Amino acid sequence: MDKHAEVTIPPYSAADRLDSWKAIASHLHRDIRTVQRWQREGLPVYRHRHFKYGSIYAYKTEVDSWWLTRQAARKKIAESRSFQFAVFKAPVLKRTIYAGLALLIGLLSLMSYHLFGPRIRRLIAQTVPSKQATIVVLPFQDLSSNSHAGAQASQFTSELISEIQRAGYVRVVQYHPDGSDALPSENFAAVARALHADAAVEGSIRYDGTHATISATLIRGSTGHALWSTQFEQEDENLKAFQQRAARTTALGIRNILF
């Protein structure tokens, strides 16, 4: 409202009139500077016709009405801001939680590495072999009485080689003799040394009707001494399944002995 504007005096009683900035400020429980600023924002304050500075007046009824209107507007703005905060609060909170969890996981990982890293590395060094062993698999002798003797021994030898390679940390060399499949026991170590192998595997298979027997021996290449031996027997017509099971168990046993 223009401070020099002439206005029509509303019909209020003398008791309703506030005749100074101090009276208006006291009525609103604010200081004079705040009330003068509110006058520029619309607080209904009037000046006398002689326009003398400071000669102002207002009416309690109008001041109270303006105050209630102003409070209602401020409340509406606060509710609007509260709604906007509620709308964007959840995504911001989620991002904050995720960032905190990521930081916590990173700190825990770093602490675990420094606390347990050396111990884990020592365990790995003890578990993983320092070098790959080499063994030679000699052709298994087939002691079966049927006409498919050679085929059964060859099949088991191939199955055993596959299982040893699958077990890991072992390099397999297959030996193919020029003469008979039957090798004297004193030649096993010589064959292993000639092929630069750490050990040799020899054995036999016998299948008579429904009774099957498989024997295997692990021989140290440097001395020719037996490191480990095993034997499997089964009354079963399914020779293939029996050979696979015996080859898998033999390969794991060899790996455990060498490492």
Image (cartoon, rainbow, N blue to C red):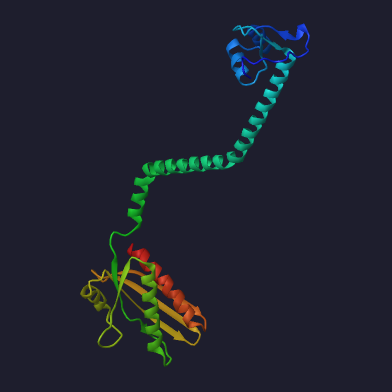
At 23% from the left edge and 75% from the top edge, which residue is drawn? Answer: 195
At 42% from the left edge and 93% from the top edge, which residue is drawn? Answer: 147
**Quadrant including the N terminus:** top right
Q: Residue furthest bottom?
A: 147
Residue 112 image position (x, y, % from top left): 41, 43
Residue 175 image position (x, y, % from top left): 28, 80
Q: Nearer the viewer, residue 244 or 66?
A: 66
Residue 207 lies, with reference to residue 13, above or below; the image says below
Q: Nearer the viewer, residue 238 or 65?
A: 65
Residue 164 image position (x, y, % from top left): 37, 71
Residue 226 lies, with reference to residue 57, above or below; the image says below
At 67% from the left edge and 30% from the top edge, which residue is drawn? Answer: 76
How many labels, in total? 0
**Quadrant including the C terminus:** bottom left
Q: Is residue 68 left or right of residue 237?
A: right
Q: Nearer the viewer, residue 114 or 240?
A: 114
At 67% from the left edge and 23% from the top edge, which residue is drawn? Answer: 70
Q: Is residue 186 left or right of residue 148?
A: left
Q: Where is residue 12, by image quadrant?
A: top right
Q: Where is residue 72, by image quadrant?
A: top right
Residue 237 image position (x, y, % from top left): 52, 84
